[in-house]
Image (cartoon, rainbow, N blue to C red):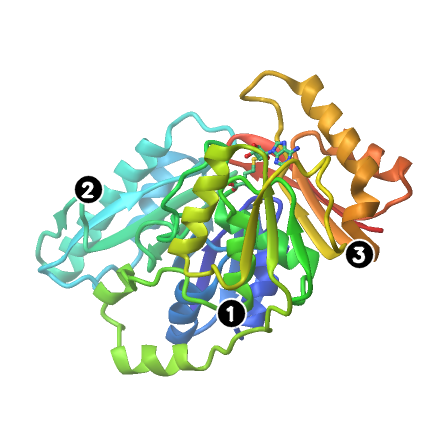
């Protein structure tokens, strides 16, 4: 079975690494997608434990296409008889590249092809339910490559059930997890000096523990014909925690409102024992100990329109970094201003190991991995 996971553009390599750690074989990396080869166990495991993944899809077809008519022909040739006659379906579509039609056109075209193909093969009409379908088919066009797949996740895993406080500039949890993997954090001391709603500390702790991504277990694979509860339980049992958290993870937040929000999120994730949130200014704070790892998502100044002020914060923070990070310590910082931040780090003698650039929502960001 070919499995496709959707992830953050520019950070696909960390999703691939995570999938390999979960014993699913990676075949290829595509833009915001990782292609894998696996069986049903892989579907259960990725949905329940992959923290860098938004959706887990079963790939039905991957073809080069030329226009909407061609999309219809390719979609019509597929077998949809795995959908039972009492189930409803919907087609969702994403598009990237330049085309003379919209993603709504693609969804409508593929939807019609599914109806026609089903009628031909089963002799009955399949029900459409755009609001709450039993089966969701994804038809994504990336350049001229059409991926038709079956959604096994339901609503994306980017939505985390622990998030009771929504920070206005929160990092996608899937991206926060990608940064944890990028940093190669091993459970030793870790600080997030601009913690906001504490996405990074929470994702780091849940990654270490291999905690279920969606504790409610509300996945759409449960409505698909291959679903077997016993097989699911057996597959999920195989996943062990990755490592222990040796010291409390520390988050620092200057705003009282966000600090209170971070405490709420940490509590709702049941991680009070492993995460300490400090209400303070990471540029002036006196920390008792230095940290082996740092993962940070400082402000960008885009919403507030004060880029100059933000660059000044970066300058002051980098100047103080030797009081925060141990000698030989490793840091990851993500921002839209990654070029300026890289220069500042370089000037202070930090070694830039790599920079991943990618899309966070509509913003082009860079994550810098550096060593002290
Ligand atoms: C981009 S947001 C972080 C969002 C966070 N990663 C999340 O997912 O919720 C940056 C945060 O840094 C905080 N901040 C700005 N300057 C700070 C400082 N000097 N010390 C500590 N926190 C600061 C801001 O209040 C803001 O909440």
Residue ID for mark 2:
130
Is label 2 or label 1 in front?
Answer: 1
Q: CA distance from mark 1 to mark 3?
A: 22 Å
Q: Nearer the viewer, residue 28 or 78?
A: 28
Q: CA distance from mark 3 to mark 2?
A: 50 Å
- Mark 2 C-beta closer than 8 Å to ligand 1: no
Residue at 64%, 70% in the rendered image: 246
Relative to 154, 286 lies left or right: right
The image quadrant that residue 111 belongs to is top left
The image quadrant that residue 141 belongs to is top left
Q: Secondary structure at mark 3?
A: strand
Residue ID for mark 3:
329
- Mark 1 C-beta closer than 8 Å to ligand 1: no
Q: Nearer the viewer, residue 285 or 229?
A: 285
| Mark 3 or mark 2: whose residue is earlier in sequence | 2
Residue ID for mark 1:
209
Q: Secondary structure at mark 1?
A: loop
In the figure, 178 relative to 110: above or below? below
State which quarter of the image contains the N terminus: bottom left
Point out residue 156 in the picture as x, y percentages from the top left corner. Answer: 37, 50
């Amino acid at each position: 079975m070919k499995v496709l996971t959707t992830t953050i553009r520019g950070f696909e390599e960390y999703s691939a690494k995570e999938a390999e750690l979960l014993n699913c074989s990676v075949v290829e990396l595509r833009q915001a997608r990782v292609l894998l080869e696996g069986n049903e166990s892989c579907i259960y495991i990725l949905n329940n434990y992959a923290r860098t993944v938004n959706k887990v899809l079963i790939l039905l077809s991957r073809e080069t296409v030329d226009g909407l008519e061609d999309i219809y022909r390719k979609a019509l040739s597929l077998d949809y008889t795995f959908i039972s006659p009492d189930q409803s379906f919907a087609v969702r579509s994403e598009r990237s590249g330049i085309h003379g039609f919209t993603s709504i056109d693609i969804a409508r075209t593929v939807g019609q092809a599914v109806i026609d193909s089903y009628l031909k093969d089963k002799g009955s009409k399949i029900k459409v339910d755009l609001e709450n379908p039993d089966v969701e088919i994804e038809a994504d066009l990336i350049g001229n490559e059409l991926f038709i797949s079956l959604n096994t996740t339901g609503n994306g895993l980017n939505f985390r059930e622990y998030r009771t406080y929504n920070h206005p500039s929160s990092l996608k949890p899937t991206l926060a997890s990608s940064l944890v993997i990028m940093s190669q954090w091993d459970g030793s001391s870790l600080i997030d000096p601009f913690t906001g709603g504490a996405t990074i500390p929470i994702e780091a702790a849940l990654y270490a523990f291999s905690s279920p991504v969606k504790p409610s277990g509300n996945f759409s694979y449960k409505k698909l014909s291959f679903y077997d509860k016993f097989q699911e339980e057996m597959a999920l049992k195989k996943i062990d925690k990755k490592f222990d958290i040796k010291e409390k993870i520390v988050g620092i937040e200057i705003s009282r409102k966000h600090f209170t929000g971070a405490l709420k999120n940490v509590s709702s994730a049941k991680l009070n024992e492993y995460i300490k949130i400090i209400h303070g200014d990471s540029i002036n704070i006196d920390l008792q100990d230095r940290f082996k790892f740092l993962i940070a998502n400082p402000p960008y100044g885009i919403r507030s329109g004060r880029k100059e002020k933000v660059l000044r914060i970066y300058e002051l923070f980098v100047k103080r970094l030797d009081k925060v990070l141990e000698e030989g310590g490793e840091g990851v910082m993500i921002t839209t201003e990654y070029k300026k931040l890289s220069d500042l780090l370089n000037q202070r003698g930090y070694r830039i190991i790599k920079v991943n650039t990618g899309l966070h929502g509509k913003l082009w960001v860079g994550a810098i991995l550096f060593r002290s």
